[in-house]
Image (cartoon, grey):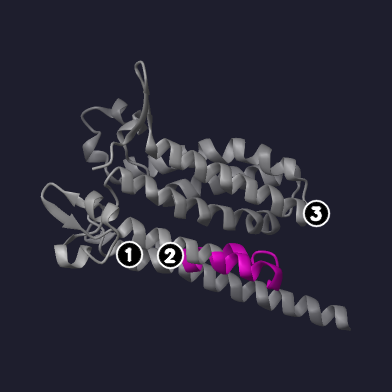
């Protein structure tokens, strides 16, 4: 097992999870900054925006997790503040970050769809990197598998997926690779997009499609009765994404026709 603590300085412990998430944030910010420069958006808006988005995403991720696991915090509500004990949900983080970003966009009169298109590839790249923090913590894995199955993976993954005498699906890896694929698709599509908002909605559709199937093998899903919450949210985002794309394309088509006239 990999030690989750990377460095200890006196009483201070710096964990690999925190380092990996910091790298994810920094790479995402750098990518969005460069894309803003290339698309006639003041990149300083990106830097200013992330000072709101990052804490809002962390708060949103924690609130979302606590909401669906309240029974674990009912006896000691203050424990809900202890995010260092684990318990962050990506859909809550996306919601929190989106609300903060839209607040900033509206306040400064920026084109909302264009800004979210700039940020979407950074977000999915950050998610791809961030799943390796789950790997270090031996979390976000799937159900039990045989040693014969896990032998298909590199040795370091096999060792880390051996938990309490049992091998488990490296679901974190499946999602990381899927997210990286979505990042590459969005990057390829960017110069070919027909209208602002297309990249954002493609992000919701593609990420959600992968997450829906990967969630089915997770052992730590948040539940709403008999249903996995992440699957319900993923289905809703796919429907909204497809509907939103159709609406944008129709609007873009009408505008194109009017310009030709």
Q: Residue 258 at what x, y percent from top left?
A: 84, 79
Q: Report which residue position mark 1 lands on.
A: 214
Which quadrant holds the C terminus? Answer: bottom right
Q: Residue 101 at what x, y percent from top left?
A: 61, 45
Q: Are marks 2 and 1 in contact (CB under 8 Å)?
A: yes
Above or below residue 25? Residue 196 is: below
Which residue is farthest left? 165
Above or below residue 234? Residue 125 is: above
Residue 193 occupies quadrant: bottom right
Q: Are marks 3 and 2 in contact (CB under 8 Å)?
A: no
The earlier-in-sequence mark between 3 and 2 is 3
The label shown at residue 40 is 3
* Kind of element beneath mark 1: helix
Q: Report which residue position mark 2 lands on.
A: 178
Above or below residue 241? Residue 162 is: above
Which quadrant holds the N terminus? Answer: top left
Structural crowding at the residue carrying mark 1, measured as other residues with C-alpha within 10 Å and reported as few (<14), some (14–19) or many (≥20): some
The earlier-in-sequence mark between 1 and 3 is 3
| 167 left or right of 34 in image | left
Q: Residue 51 at what x, y percent from top left?
A: 60, 35
Q: Which residues are magenta?
A: 184-207
The earlier-in-sequence mark between 2 and 1 is 2
Structural crowding at the residue carrying mark 2, measured as other residues with C-alpha within 10 Å and reported as few (<14), some (14–19) or many (≥20): many
| 47 left or right of 149 in image | right
Q: Residue 235 at what x, y percent from top left?
A: 40, 67
- Residue drawn at (34%, 56%) of the image: 172
* Kind of element beneath mark 3: loop
């Amino acid at each position: 097992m990999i030690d989750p603590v990377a460095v200890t300085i006196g009483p201070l412990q710096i964990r690999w999870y925190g380092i990996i998430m910091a790298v994810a944030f920094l790479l995402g910010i750098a990518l969005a900054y460069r894309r803003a420069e290339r698309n006639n958006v003041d990149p300083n808006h990106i830097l200013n925006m992330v000072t709101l988005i990052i804490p809002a995403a962390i708060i949103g991720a924690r609130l979302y997790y606590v909401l669906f696991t309240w029974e674990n915090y009912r006896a000691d509500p203050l424990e809900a503040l202890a995010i260092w004990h684990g318990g962050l949900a990506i859909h809550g983080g996306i919601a929190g970050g989106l609300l903060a970003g839209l607040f900033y966009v509206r306040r400064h009169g920026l084109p909302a769809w264009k800004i979210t298109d700039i940020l979407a590839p950074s977000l999915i790249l950050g998610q791809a990197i961030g799943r390796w923090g789950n790997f270090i913590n031996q979390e976000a894995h799937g159900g039990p598998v045989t040693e014969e199955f896990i032998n298909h993976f590199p040795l370091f993954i096999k060792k880390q997926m051996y938990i309490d005498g049992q091998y488990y699906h490296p679901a974190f890896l499946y999602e990381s690779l899927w997210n990286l694929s979505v990042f590459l698709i969005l990057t390829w599509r960017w110069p070919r997009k027909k209208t602002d908002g297309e990249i954002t909605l493609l992000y919701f559709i593609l990420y959600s499609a992968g997450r829906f199937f990967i969630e089915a093998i997770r052992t730590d899903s948040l539940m709403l009765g008999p249903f996995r919450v992440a699957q319900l949210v993923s289905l809703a985002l796919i429907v909204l994404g497809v509907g939103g794309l159709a609406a944008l394309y129709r609007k873009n088509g009408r505008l194109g026709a009017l310009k030709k006239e």
